[in-house]
Image: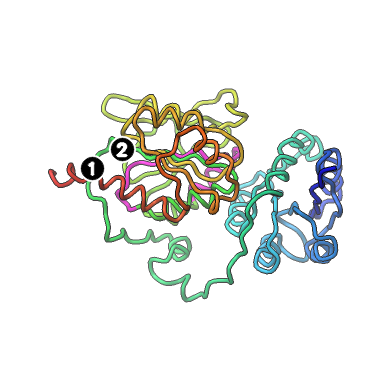
Amino acid sequence: MPKKTRVVVVDDSALVRGLLAEIINRQTDMECIGAAADPLVAREMIRNLNPDVITLDVEMPRMDGIDFLSKLMRLRPMPVVMVSTLTERGADVTLRALELGAIDFVAKPKIGVADGLRLLAEDITEKIRTAAHAHVRRLPPAAAPAAASAPGHPAAAAATGVRPAAPVASLGRLSTEKIIFIGASTGGTEATKEVLMNLPHDAPAVVITQHMPAGFTKSYATRLDSLCRIRVKEAVDGDRILPGHAYIAPGGLHLSVERSGANYIARVRDGDPVNRHKPSVEVLFESAAKVVGPNALGVMLTGMGADGARAMKTMRDAGSWNVCQDEASCVVFGMPREAINHGAANEVLPLQRIAPALIERLKSTVGAAIHRV
């Protein structure tokens, strides 16, 4: 018999602990081996039971879930799936958890928790399975306060609202025709942040589909906007796609790009899930191939599954230049692997090299036009 994934549930609600244990134990490939009401009990349980994955509530007594996660990822890193509430504060705290190394999160409803969690059973168990096979990295020691408060440091930008100065290696006045398209899922919130933070203020427009539920993408966009040189916002239907700006698909809606005269605009629409996702990378990348063609640059980042792989190959066939994140730097290599297997990638690179590669590609393709201006 294959080894079952052993899960510890950490939640201050006895009802939620019981429901999660029930959902987990109904699966043939996983089992709940313990349930803790707070992080102090969980600490001993983890030490004694050595689980493969833990689910962790965001807000708990005796020790905040974020404090516990921070200590865990520094001292004993392991796959964690956060259980958060669908509130603005819940979204902000969840994003912080992903920064600290949580693999993914489940958003539990504010009311009707029992029925809501049962409806989310497939989502919960899929995320536990993904977490069990994800690449987990040890969180480095906390940065010294002096470094975080230094002028131009991203943390200082987040704290003060002051955007970091544009880098010396500016791209100049780029053609508004160029657009960067990014697709991501599990692990993608941090991977996308890494790419965007390393783009200059005058980069081409960036359009992003990150698998994320409704209620979280606005907080995610606001967080990125405080850290990046380019402006970042949740996409609104009809937005003009402008250089120096990034547009994130709203959770629960599809995002695509259309042409309107001389401009590109965002199309935000409801509809059926595609590849079981809404928003879907497939929808965004299909529009890139159809509307933007050789002026598109495609990026496939970490994520589970195959969403967007076929459409990324269509982008390449239409003349785009595409890069996929490599396995070593992915939290989950599913989506990049599928895109590579479909022949969609021009390059496969570590995460830290993707933004520089985009910049070099843009310089090579628009440099002559810049010098003619």
The numbered mark, 2 or 1, whose residue comes first in the sequence reads 2
For numbered disc 2, what is the local secondary structure? loop
Q: Which circle, 2 or 1, is nearer the viewer?
A: 1
Residue 44 shown left or right of residue 175 in the figure: right
Q: Are marks 2 and 1 in contact (CB under 8 Å)?
A: yes
Q: Around disc 1, counting alpha carbons within 10 Å, would you say few (fewer than 14), some (14 to 19), or many (20 or more)?
A: some
Residue type beneath disc 2: Lys
Indicate the quadrant where residue 347 lies.
top left
Verify whether residue 125 appears in magenta.
no
Q: Nearer the viewer, residue 319 or 139?
A: 319
Is 135 on the left-hand or right-hand side of 368?
A: right
Q: Quadrant of the C terminus?
A: top left
| Amino acid at pointer 1 | Val
Please, which residue is most extreme toward the left here?
Answer: 372
Q: How many marks?
A: 2
Task: State the residue position of label 2.
Answer: 178
Q: Is residue 206 left or right of residue 187?
A: left
Front in this rendered view, residue 285 or 309: 309
Part of the protein shown in magenta: 200-222
Q: Residue at x 60, y 26 (%)?
A: 273
**Residue 216 on image: x %, y %:** 58, 44
Up-down relation of residue 265 to residue 64 (above or below): above
Residue 200 seen by the camera: yes
Under circle 1, the secondary element is: helix
Res 298 label: none
Q: CA distance from mark 2 to mark 1?
A: 9 Å
**Residue 238: in sight, yes or no?**
no
**Which residue in the protein does label 1 denote?**
366
Query: Would you place residue 163 above or below residue 185 in this image?
Result: below
Residue 224 percent coordinates (x, y): 47, 51
